[in-house]
Image: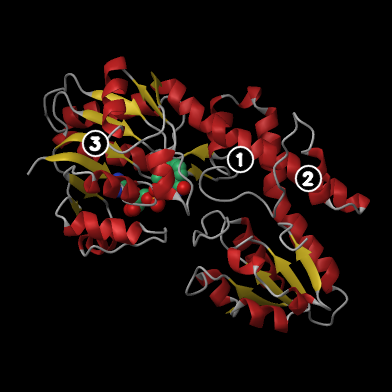
């Protein structure tokens, strides 16, 4: 069978995208390397937490428009949405394009002349060209004829976990082609469901735009985090300072927090730094400030804990942002793990969006409890994530406890 669209990688980005196309009448094939994910989706179920995605996937699979599999299948369009992490190593982090390369090589035999190949993964400058070269190279390795008239386009995704289905439809998009015709074809494809503006450009500009967006947010959060350190030293409430400063007509300061996490803002600036290390001191410093914030929080807990023989610390939240279950690159998890490792405090964790603790915390015999139980048992309450549930906490429960509110939720 030939499909309209083959979505490669059925994670937080690929699965909503595949399902939205499928429920708009496209015949969609989802390719993934995980048998568990493929089986889950083919049952009409989902493997990630995202509001309303379960309903959409059930409709897409039940209606016969979405099928998942482990083998690449021919399609008119390929949309690649695989991870683009970095290698940490000893020195500066460097981009890891292994997933994009392996996805490109896996589809190479089934790409036909005239196909549209879209890279949605957030990628270093030049990755769309590299994807074209990997596909051509793999065909040559397999003794297949070179492709003609294939259009390669970078269409970065900007949707926010927790509101992905709305943003998928409403956000503006960028289609950056290796050819203008490719960008136009991608534009027409996304028009199937996108009601936002769709801007056409070249692939390298599109790659740079997405990285710029996240590097910009990282630098702005670093500014807020630096303010929080200065205010703490001066015994001034940083959130009041920011709120009042933001009354200036040309000032917009973001909020500080316990660090910057997730797989986008904490990762993508490194792709720009890697492209031009000598030209990016600001971005490198921003990364350093944001990466240093968890340690500052840990020191704060330690200095309060000194008053107790063995302090009971309630950590509220492990996710990298509010109201999601995603713990990847989460500074809150990093803080909880470091506190558990201290061995000098008793740690109680509350994370309403997960069923069980990550192995690292289980191994340290940390318990996962409800918000109320965690607060009731604690000497120190450390608020790490501004989850809805924590905002609703009865403030009287917090009396006589040391509060470290890294999000300014309980001001
Ligand atoms: N999650 C977000 O909020 C978000 C937002 C914007 C952009 N992005 C970007 O989108 C890309 C994908 O991110 P994600 O969060 O969806 O990742 P994810 O880890 O949730 O999903 C990736 C999927 O790709 C699959 N996969 C890996 N290698 C594969 C291969 N060779 N062939 C087929 N499938 C393969 C994995 O099994 C997984 O299911 C990344 O570049 C990320 O930076 C993510």
Residue located beneath label 1 in the image: 91
Numbered label attached to residue 75: none
How far separated are the C-alphas under marks 2 and 1? 38 Å
Q: Is mark 3 within 8 Å of ligand 1?
A: no
Asked whether residue 326 appears in the rendered view, the answer is: yes
Q: Residue at x 70, y 30 (%)?
A: 282
Instruction: Look at the image and tell me in which quarter the N terminus lies.
Output: top left
Binning the other alpha carbons within 10 Å of mark 1 as few (below 14), some (14 to 19) or many (20 upward) gives few
The percent coordinates of residue 362 (x first, y second) are 54, 76
Residue in the image at 35% along x and 36% along y: 194
- Note whether 24 is above or below 295 in the view shown: above
Question: Which quarter shows the C terminus?
Answer: bottom right
Residue furthest to the top: 180
Q: Nearer the viewer, residue 114 or 342?
A: 114
Q: Nearer the viewer, residue 291 or 332?
A: 332
Pick out the residue farthest to the left.
1
Of marks 3 and 2, which one's residue comes earlier in the chain?
A: 3
Confirm or deny contact between disc 2 and disc 1 (CB under 8 A). Answer: no
Q: How many marks?
A: 3
Kindly tell me whether mark 2's CB lies below 8 Å from ligand 1. no
Label 1: state its secondary structure.
loop
Residue occupying the point 51% across, 69% down: 358
Relative depth, front residue between 255 and 280: 255
For label 2, count other residues whose C-alpha is less than 10 Å away and answer few (under 14), some (14-19) or many (20+): some
User: Residue 34, can we see it?
Assistant: no
Mark 3 lies on residue: 78
User: What residue is disc 2 on?
Assistant: 243
Q: Position of residue 256 (x, y in %)?
A: 72, 49
């Amino acid at each position: 069978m030939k499909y309209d669209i083959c979505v490669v990688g059925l994670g937080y980005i690929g699965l909503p995208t595949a399902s939205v196309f499928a429920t708009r009448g496209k015949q969609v094939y989802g390719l993934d390397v995980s048998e568990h994910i493929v089986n889950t989706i083919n049952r009409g179920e989902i493997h990630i937490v995202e509001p309303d995605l379960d309903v959409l996937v059930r409709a897409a699979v039940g209606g016969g428009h979405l099928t998942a599999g482990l083998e690449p299948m021919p399609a008119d369009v390929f949309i690649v949405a695989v991870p683009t992490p970095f290698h940490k190593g000893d020195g500066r982090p460097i981009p890891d394009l292994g997933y994009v390369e392996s996805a490109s090589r896996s589809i190479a035999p089934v790409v036909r002349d005239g196909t549209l190949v879209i890279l949605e993964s957030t990628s270093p400058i030049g990755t769309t060209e590299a994807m074209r070269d990997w596909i051509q190279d793999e065909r040559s390795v397999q003794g297949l004829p070179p492709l003609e008239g294939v259009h390669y386009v970078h269409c970065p995704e900007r949707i926010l976990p927790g509101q992905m289905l709305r943003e998928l439809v409403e956000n503006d998009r960028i289609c950056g082609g290796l050819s203008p015709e490719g960008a136009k074809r991608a534009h027409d494809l996304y028009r199937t469901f996108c009601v936002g503006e769709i801007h056409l450009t070249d692939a390298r500009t599109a790659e740079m735009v997405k990285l710029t967006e996240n590097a910009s947010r990282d630098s702005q959060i670093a500014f807020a985090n630096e303010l929080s350190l200065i205010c703490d030293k001066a015994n001034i409430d940083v959130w009041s300072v920011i709120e009042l400063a933001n009354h200036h007509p040309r000032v917009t300061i973001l909020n500080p927090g316990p660090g910057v996490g997730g797989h986008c803002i904490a990762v993508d600036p490194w792709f720009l730094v890697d492209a031009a290390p000598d030209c990016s001191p600001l971005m490198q410093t921003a990364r350093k400030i944001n990466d240093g914030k968890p340690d500052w929080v840990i020191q704060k807990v330690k200095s309060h804990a000194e008053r107790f023989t063995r302090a009971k610390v309630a950590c509220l939240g492990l996710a990298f942002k509010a109201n999601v279950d995603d713990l990847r690159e989460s500074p809150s998890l990093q803080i909880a793990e470091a506190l558990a490792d201290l061995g000098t405090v008793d740690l109680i964790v509350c994370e309403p969006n997960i069923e069980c603790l990550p192995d690292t915390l289980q191994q340290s015999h940390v318990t996962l409890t409800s918000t109320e139980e965690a607060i009731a048992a604690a000497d120190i309450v450390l608020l790490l994530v501004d989850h809805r549930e924590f905002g609703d906490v009865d403030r009287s429960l917090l009396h006589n406890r040391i509060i470290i509110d890294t999000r300014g939720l309980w001001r």
